[in-house]
Image (cartoon, coloured by chain):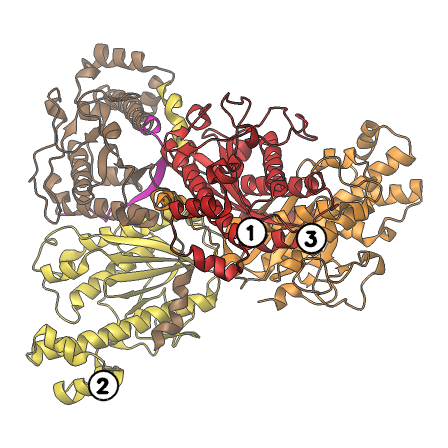
Chain colours: A yellow, B brown, C orange, D red
Amino acid sequence: MAKSKYEYVKEFETDDRMLRNVYVLVRIDGKGFHKFSQTHDFAKPNDVRGINLMNHAARCVMHELDDIVLAFGESDEYSFLFRKSTDLYQRREAKIVSTVVSLFTSAYVYYWNDYFTDLKRPLYPPVFDGRAVLYPSEVEVKDYFAWRQADTHINNLFNTSFWALVEEGGLTPKAAEARLCGTDSKDKNEMLFTEFNTNYSKLPAMYRKGSVLLREQIPKDADKDAIIPTLPETLPGSKSAKVVPVLDTAITESGLQSGPDPISESV
Amino acid sequence: MAKSKYEYVKEFETDDRMLRNVYVLVRIDGKGFHKFSQTHDFAKPNDVRGINLMNHAARCVMHELDDIVLAFGESDEYSFLFRKSTDLYQRREAKIVSTVVSLFTSAYVYYWNDYFTDLKRPLYPPVFDGRAVLYPSEVEVKDYFAWRQADTHINNLFNTSFWALVEEGGLTPKAAEARLCGTDSKDKNEMLFTEFNTNYSKLPAMYRKGSVLLREQIPKDADKDAIIPTLPETLPGSKSAKVVPVLDTAITESGLQSGPDPISESV
Amino acid sequence: MAKSKYEYVKEFETDDRMLRNVYVLVRIDGKGFHKFSQTHDFAKPNDVRGINLMNHAARCVMHELDDIVLAFGESDEYSFLFRKSTDLYQRREAKIVSTVVSLFTSAYVYYWNDYFTDLKRPLYPPVFDGRAVLYPSEVEVKDYFAWRQADTHINNLFNTSFWALVEEGGLTPKAAEARLCGTDSKDKNEMLFTEFNTNYSKLPAMYRKGSVLLREQIPKDADKDAIIPTLPETLPGSKSAKVVPVLDTAITESGLQSGPDPISESV
Amino acid sequence: MAKSKYEYVKEFETDDRMLRNVYVLVRIDGKGFHKFSQTHDFAKPNDVRGINLMNHAARCVMHELDDIVLAFGESDEYSFLFRKSTDLYQRREAKIVSTVVSLFTSAYVYYWNDYFTDLKRPLYPPVFDGRAVLYPSEVEVKDYFAWRQADTHINNLFNTSFWALVEEGGLTPKAAEARLCGTDSKDKNEMLFTEFNTNYSKLPAMYRKGSVLLREQIPKDADKDAIIPTLPETLPGSKSAKVVPVLDTAITESGLQSGPDPISESV
């Protein structure tokens, strides 16, 4: 039969199973989201619709893939942490990465209109890419999330200051950039407070610290404004109905500052 | 600054650039599309709306990624062939695979309503996965596509026979399966002709041979019914306006039976 | 200049640096050592000259490569454990594996005549191959060595019984094999004791438990017969003069039964 | 039994089979051979004993591994080209690289005294490392060897000039280096001819062009001084008795300048 004659081409496929018993971290990034956010008039410095849609898409990923124990999102990126012992798709790298990226993208387009209610669908299909990174120990995983959260803080403080200068202060983007050049965090906080009457530390935690997705429990000290709008607990097509809240929490070298420690507790 | 302290975690990322000067083949597959097609009442054995949506999504991928020289689709899978010399994303595997999968998924959800006009969006977000395979020579690439097309033929002849027995012949699925057990291609052709008045070779080429996407030229002997419904030549968000027709053509060991030879001609 | 024109071929080299912060285990194996040991009339079941030469070659490897914290040898194989934090050759896999194999092979041929004193050099050049395996945690590393030591025990008890039956009992190899078929450890111990007046547990530890190489300290309870013949502490060409003793020790799930714990203590 | 309990550690071994149907090139390099050649008083700029020993060791590798079709050596490095279709060790990378390196090292130590007749064995065990590179097409393979041969030429012309200035001209190494700084090939040829009465192009081809090892035929125009001293055609322990001559030949983009073309002819 014709089949057998050609099937040798399958032998060119390689085995891409990842090392066992190490954490698998999949990070996705929006492609060309600077342009995408401009085209869709995202509010500056943060568009709550866009953030909530990202969080919703990430929740869909966690609903489908039970071995993800923690996710963290900021701007147009999201990081998903799989438990060390996961045997999802026998740990095949391309399968895991492509499934996470496809799930996320699909949900982003699918739920678009639930957040951007005045536009049936985006003006063109958005695209994300992804990659996997292996981390052997808790230390690196916690430092990874601490790194992403530090990045969120730095970017958001800059963006908040920049757009205050431009939108409220009437500066040109160029002038705003020049004004911020060489300033440190303290300078920016001071400027926001004295010139724009903004207490940076009172801005929504989700802007300042990014979004953390966990399974099941809501820690008692969770900041209310950090919780994404309630969604139907059973998403269409999802396998489980677990609640996945978003917390206001710092991720430090000793893990999540409040609540459970999904990194240390997962096996 | 906090950043530098944690940035060592980036060193755990590995270099996944693929060998140079070999063909890169990315194949995507629908996840759980048996259930997906049932949930959405896809016509059996072929749903023209579903096939056209797959082809449309694949065209979007080719519009975005100029180094794809040929694509082939059947059922819920699509294969994309990159030219040997491509340096897209420095040939990083995860980046290439995840981008193709995300583009395809995004377009599939985005254009859903253009083909399934009575349903605003699917009942739940569809998901695809993907993988890359490297092929050193034309021989393997042509055999790869010949393999997928032989697979299309075998599956479609079986499905056509099966659903004729069930939908027109009134057999139960179990009885239909039993009836087909042990039959070869000739038997099935004969049965379709004598019992269901169906000349298999006159069925649309797209069903029998899958869909081939090429750049630019439409070979003069292309079967009309193999061409997907005309689409706006410039897709929103795409970089180029190249025409990407779908041909009725066999892919054999000597390449495409008719028209240009994008495999041999690409570098 | 001619050089630059061709240097693009270097771009085909791939980056094979291994994941950081996991244990690197390099295991080497003799190629065709069944034939090699027969050709050189190795004593059966154990040739003390051959074992000592293996141990000597392994010591040379440890003398050269400071990041090896533990080595274990049995029969014609040797395993070398690198500390998790090693940055030797930037953790490039081929470089590390090939260097270990070359060092070992070179020393084996070089020191041959010191152990096989009646033969200037082997009758033909011996060959070893090697591979690297990554282990994320102490648990797997300890189980790895426990696995190799269990293997040593099983093989040595079988071989001791087999050669007793052949050399002292006068059985043919075939008959000896038949006699041992289906016996367990207790049966073999019993047979050695009653028929050949051999108390298996009193045989040299090096035969029963393989050879363990550690750095620096000799634990106080080390069995004397487990220590390899004294060698000049500074090997020619070696970088350091550390003493590398061989112990009589069991490797269990909790590490080395006696003495220091180089696995847990290394970083 | 104890064995099964621990055998899970085998699952951490990864599959390192290399892509099929591409050339496999293994290159080995001496480690610390600057010091090694000084310690053993190698003649400068070329030590014929050292080169012949390298060639002998490389011949042993080719005798053992039938799928090597061509080898090229210069200084302390040697490159071995495997046919595209080789299935040696199922193309496992670590196995192939480590075997080549071990074979070479073993033979180098083993045959040392046949070339360095006044020294029973080297003063310490020499070490080589190795790596594999994949090349998809003849073009890259030929350019690879052309690259190594261009390197040989450049280095040898420099070294010949440098040692003429030092050993015959009485300059210090520093002064010789200064004298050569900024000179091109023509300048060096001229200097050798006018100051040291040396016609560079008449020096042994093996020095100027490196050593090429082929299987079986000696092309009729082979330069006599390029052939290594006759060796017993059947090496101890080797599987075959094929003659492996060394040629005086240039390797250009169109392959070997004279004689057969093992690159194009191998499959």
* The disc label shown at residue A187, or none: 2
- The magenta-colored residue range is B121-141
Q: How many numbered tags mark residues here?
A: 3
Residue A204 place in picture, x, y as percent: 22, 77
Q: In the shown orientation, is residue C71 left or right of residue D196? A: right
**SS under mark 1:** helix
Residue type of the residue flagged with mark 2:
Asp
Tell me which label, 1 or 3, sits earlier in the chain: 3
**Which of C133 and A90 lies nearest the eye of the viewer?**
C133
Q: Are marks 1 and 2 on the same chain?
A: no
Q: Which residue is label 1 attached to?
A: D168
User: Which residue is denoted by mark 3 in the rendering?
Assistant: D124
The amino acid on which the numbered mark 1 sits, given as a three-letter code, is: Glu
Chain letter, disc 1 residue? D
Disc 1 + disc 3, Cβ < 8 Å: no
Quarter occupied by residue B2: bottom left
Q: Which mark is residue D121?
A: none
Q: Residue at x 84, y 57 (%)?
A: C225
Q: Nearer the viewer, mark 1 or mark 3?
A: 1
Q: Is residue C21 visible?
A: no
- For mark 2, does the 10 Å Cα neighbourhood hold few (<14), some (14 to 19), or many (20 or more) residues? few
Q: Position of residue B172 (x, y in %)?
A: 30, 24
Distance from disc 1 to disc 3, alpha carbons, whole Å, reads 31 Å
Foreground pick, D205 / B21:
D205
Residue lying at the far bottom of the rendered structure:
A194
